[in-house]
């Protein structure tokens, strides 16, 4: 009897507290800064082109093989406006298959891909979450605006050992 | 298995009852075939494999950095503990040292994960016994832990934060303050859940003396973790074979007396308090420094094999890793605690009433993602 009464006291005490629930569709839980939503591609505002060069390192390290990328010669480089010799031609991420692990962001050498705060992607058809390059860049721009994202400062050193290893591995194969 | 014929004599007829795989209180997709005589369970046969994804085989086709994501999804309630055990296995195989600060971050997050896991258990165990209120309180507190994880790791459940050689990144600047506030809230929350459920007469009647298992049988079945400690065996990998920095903390191992369902429940409640003691000490001792030992992206551990064990919220988890020197492991074998605990279900459920089956199964705190892998 006493045990039950103690329990009832707890429920009684909670009557006077603020509710902790969010009424979800109307009200959203605030997102933390580090929140990893779906990956998006970033936009270089200085030269008006994507950071991505289509080097496919993220494609190779994706555990679920949810992305694909195609590289092309950069027309802006020929004009002398950009330092990127190659640029992404097409890029597709099947966000329905993405497991939000963030490995693509870790392996990217160009700050081109980033985990956005995008997380509500309900669609009507199964393939509607296959996101192409213009959509990914649009999502990236809105994330840049929202979070004040800046590319990492350029290091004045040689390429990182990771990149080297990567090339060495490629050469071996 | 059981003779169902009555042979013309006046006798009770045994009936087969299918429990699961869609039964809500099997905590996943677990099927039990029960043979009952009236209300009593005469025999049972557990069927597993409904959530089998072939994780161990999948590991053989993935790079070492990618396997961490598979371990996340094995025991989906204590992800960080699972990540840690795999990373430790690779680190030991490669002889990779982990920075001090990374070890402390790992321990803090793993213990926080243990509290979250046990809170979920307290809630669902209440539901199994017929109490609807505790899960609301337990989830309220667990939600705060999830938010904390979101702030540190970037994800609420599938973190991929603990990496081979350390952790992904340093904790946020306001980590200590936020953790202090969180611990205060958690302590109060756990006391509330404890008050609501633990000594309620109805709950005591449903759980005391139900599903008793003695220490010898439990050890023979390979039980571990809180389910074994409830039988009075003070076995904890964190104490017996201290890994990471667990030898630097002062914490106790709560043990039960009888090995019944209530003991299995209350050991977990006490364990949450001990976990919070560890977190407090770790926050005080946490040194500055790097958080990861840089290693290559494509890891090629030397040829060899290693077995590493650690303490999960559910018991002792072990990883047996064989490498043949390639960039992918030759074999990854996991010793899952829930699977070994679940195998004692036949011993626990025999000669009990069918109404207690759900309570006893719930008291083992199984996660089917880990049982089936």
Image (cartoon, grey):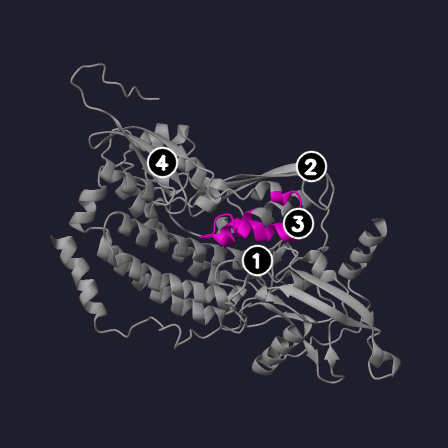
Rounded to the nearest whole Å, what is the CA distance between mark 3 and mark 4?
36 Å
Q: Are marks 3 and 2 on the same chain?
A: yes
Mark closest to the chain's N terminus, 3 or 4: 4
Would residue B245 be found to the left or right of residue B210 on screen? right
Q: Are marks 4 and 1 on the same chain?
A: yes
In front here: B32 or B327? B32
Residue at (34%, 64%) from the top-left corner? B140
> Could you say which quadrant of the image residue B236 lies in?
top left
Q: Do labels 1 and 2 share a chain?
A: yes
Would residue B38 be found to the left or right of residue B337 on screen? left
Q: Nearer the viewer, mark 3 or mark 4?
A: 4
Q: Alpha-carbon neighbours of circle 4 within 10 Å: few (<14), some, or many (≥20)?
A: some
In front here: B167 or A57? A57
Q: Is residue B80 magenta?
A: yes
Rounded to the nearest whole Å, what is the CA distance between mark 2 and mark 4?
40 Å
- Magenta part of the chain: B58-85
Residue holding disc 1: B160
Report if the CB atoms under discs 1 and 2 are less than 8 Å apart. no
Mark sitting on residue B64: 3
Mark closest to the chain's N terminus, 2 or 4: 4
Mark closest to the chain's N terminus, 1 or 2: 1
> Could you say which quadrant of the image residue B44 lies in?
top left
- Residue B229, compared with residue A133, is above or below; it is above
Residue holding disc 2: B304
| Chain letter of the residue carrying label 4 | B
Q: What element carries label 4?
A: strand
Q: Position of residue B196 (x, y in %)?
A: 22, 57
Residue holding disc 4: B32
Q: Nearer the viewer, mark 2 or mark 4?
A: 4
| Chain letter of the residue carrying label 2 | B
Q: Is mark 2 on a helix, strand or loop?
A: strand
């Amino acid at each position: 009897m006493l045990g039950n009464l103690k329990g009832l006291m707890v429920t009684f005490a909670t009557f006077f507290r603020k509710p902790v629930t969010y009424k979800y569709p109307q009200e959203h839980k605030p997102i933390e800064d580090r929140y990893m939503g779906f990956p998006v591609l970033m936009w270089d505002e200085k030269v008006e082109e994507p950071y991505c060069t289509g080097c496919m390192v993220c494609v190779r390290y994706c555990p679920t093989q949810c992305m694909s990328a195609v590289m092309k010669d950069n027309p802006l480089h020929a004009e002398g406006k950009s330092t990127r010799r190659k640029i992404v031609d097409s890029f597709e991420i099947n966000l329905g298959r993405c497991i939000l692990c963030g490995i693509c962001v870790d392996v990217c050498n160009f700050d081109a891909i980033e985990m956005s705060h995008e997380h509500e992607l309900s669609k009507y058809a199964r393939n509607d979450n296959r996101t192409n390059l213009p959509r990914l860049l649009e999502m990236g721009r809105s994330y840049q605006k929202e979070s004040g994202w800046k590319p990492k400062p350029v290091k004045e050193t040689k390429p990182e050992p990771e990149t080297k290893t990567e090339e060495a591995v490629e050469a071996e194969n | 298995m059981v003779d169902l014929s009555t042979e013309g004599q006046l006798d009770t007829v045994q009936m087969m009852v299918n429990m699961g795989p869609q039964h809500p209180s099997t905590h996943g997709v677990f099927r039990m075939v029960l043979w009952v005589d009236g209300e009593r369970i005469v025999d049972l046969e557990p069927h597993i494999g409904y959530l089998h994804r072939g994780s161990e085989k999948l590991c053989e086709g993935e790079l070492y950095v990618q396997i961490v994501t598979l371990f996340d999804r094995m025991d989906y309630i204590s992800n960080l503990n699972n990540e840690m055990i795999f990373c430790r296995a690779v680190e030991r195989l490669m002889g990779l040292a982990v920075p001090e600060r990374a070890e402390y971050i790992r321990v803090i997050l793993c213990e926080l994960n243990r509290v979250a896991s046990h809170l979920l258990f307290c809630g669902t165990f209440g539901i199994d016994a017929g109490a609807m209120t505790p899960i609301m309180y337990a989830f309220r507190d667990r939600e705060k832990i999830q938010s904390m994880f979101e702030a540190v790791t970037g994800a609420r459940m599938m973190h991929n934060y603990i990496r081979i050689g350390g952790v992904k990144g340093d904790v946020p600047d306001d980590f200590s303050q936020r953790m202090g506030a969180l611990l205060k809230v958690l302590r109060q929350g756990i006391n509330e859940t404890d008050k609501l459920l633990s000594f309620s007469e109805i709950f005591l009647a449903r759980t005391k003396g139900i599903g008793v298992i003695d220490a010898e049988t439990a050890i023979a079945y390979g039980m571990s973790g809180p389910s074994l400690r409830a039988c009075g065996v003070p076995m904890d990998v964190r104490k017996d074979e201290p890994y990471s920095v667990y030898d630097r903390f002062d914490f106790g191992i709560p043990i039960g007396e009888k090995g019944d369902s209530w003991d299995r429940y209350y050991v977990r409640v006490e364990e949450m308090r001990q976990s919070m003691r560890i977190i407090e000490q770790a926050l005080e001792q946490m040194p500055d420094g790097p958080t990861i030992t840089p290693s290559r992206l494509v890891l090629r551990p030397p040829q060899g094999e290693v077995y590493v064990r650690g303490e999960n919220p559910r018991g002792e988890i072990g990883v047996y890793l064989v490498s043949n020197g390639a960039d992918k492991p030759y074999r990854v074998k996991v010793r899952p605690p829930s699977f070994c605990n679940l195998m004692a279900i036949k011993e626990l459920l025999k000669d009990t009433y069918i109404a207690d089956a759900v309570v006893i199964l719930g008291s083992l705190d199984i996660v089917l993602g880990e049982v089936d892998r």
